[in-house]
Image (spheres, rainbow, N blue to C red):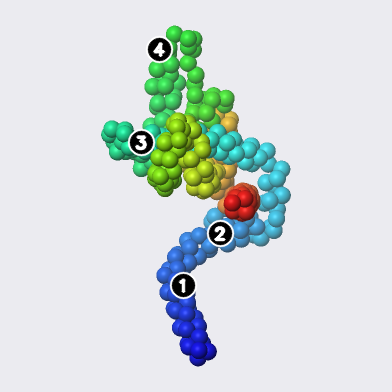
Amino acid sequence: MSDTYVAVNKSKLKNKKNLVFWCWLFITPNLIFYAAFQGWPIVMNIYNSMMDWSGLGNATFIGLDNFKELVTDSYFWKSYGNSFVFMAGSVPPLMIFSLIAALIVNNPKLKFATAYRTIIFIPVITTASIVGIIMVYIWGSDGAVNAALSNLPFVESTINWLGSSKWAMFAVIAVFVWKNLGMNMIYWLAALQGVPRQLLEAAEIDGAGVLQKFFYVTLPQIIPIGAVILLVNISSTLRAFDLIKTMTNGGPSYSTDVISTYIYRFAFSSEMGLPRLGYASAAATLFALTIAIIAITTTLIRRSNNTQRRVSK
């Protein structure tokens, strides 16, 4: 009996080693590509952040001087704050409106649901820079938005959306939400289609209405995926660049300037004088550290909530 037991354990151990070997074999190409195209650039960015370098010629090591200058730069903190304003203004409507759209098109009784999904998803596959250029004309002082507003009886005067420090951020957020609504809808659809039909049918038999089924059956089932969607949206909004660059270029008066456009301005543009790649790398490093802290914190909170949910069950 003992010999058989040992033989079985050896066989299991061998199978486990084979499984680990094949897993690492298939993961290795991804690790190589990640190290080459993600890991190495991150290391070089941190290295460059300690250099006085224009991107051309010799670089001079200056230690933490770039970071010291950053913390006293009011434009950096303005763009830093604008990044979170953009996130706070974009994420909630993205989450809510995309969930509503997913609930509507997920209704099996809805006719032409596939066509509606396609229409909502089309902006996602459109290049953001092209969308930004087109939206300049739509949201401009003589654009389609003001033309529609001028026909309303209660509107006394139109707004220069992209030329106003008060309204430019709102216009950019509105376009960003519209463009990314379709992708979030797909995420929510995947979550909704994972809700067991038996639970919904049982709730309906018990007399639950539409709202009751959503809040007491559907919502608890899709919250875990919703947390992942939230993290994806936070990450994408904090990294927004192309849409803002083409619509406002961070203006007017830096009112829509975010960290991405701030970095671009110092690294590749002559707007601030001679390009300062080292200084821009320091800004990128500091903001990346902020994003990492946010990601780690939200992940820990999510894991804690999942643990408490398991314990309560």
User: Front-most of 15 and 84?
Assistant: 15
Please tell me which of labels 4 and 3 falls first in the chain. 3
Dot 2 corresponds to which residue? 42
Q: Residues within 10 Å of mark 3 (few under 14, many from 20)?
A: few
Instruction: Inspect the image, locate mark 1, and give the three-letter code of the amino acid beneath it.
Output: Trp
Please tell me which of labels 1 and 4 falls first in the chain. 1
User: Front-most of 246 and 234?
Assistant: 234
Q: Is residue 94 left or right of residue 279?
A: left
Is 229 above or below relative to 167?
below
Dot 1 corresponds to which residue? 24
In 3D space, how far apart are the residues under numbered discs 2 and 1 (Cα atoms)?
24 Å
Q: Is residue 255 left or right of residue 18?
A: right
Instruction: Inspect the image, locate mark 4, and give the three-letter code of the amino acid beneath it.
Output: Asn
Instruction: Inspect the image, locate mark 3, and give the three-letter code of the amino acid beneath it.
Output: Asn
Percent position of residue 176, x then y:
46, 36
* Residue 189 lies in quadrant: top left
Please tell me which of labels 2 and 4 falls first in the chain. 2
Identify the residue at horizontal 53%, vertical 62% (top origin).
39
Q: Residues within 10 Å of mark 1 (few under 14, many from 20)?
A: few
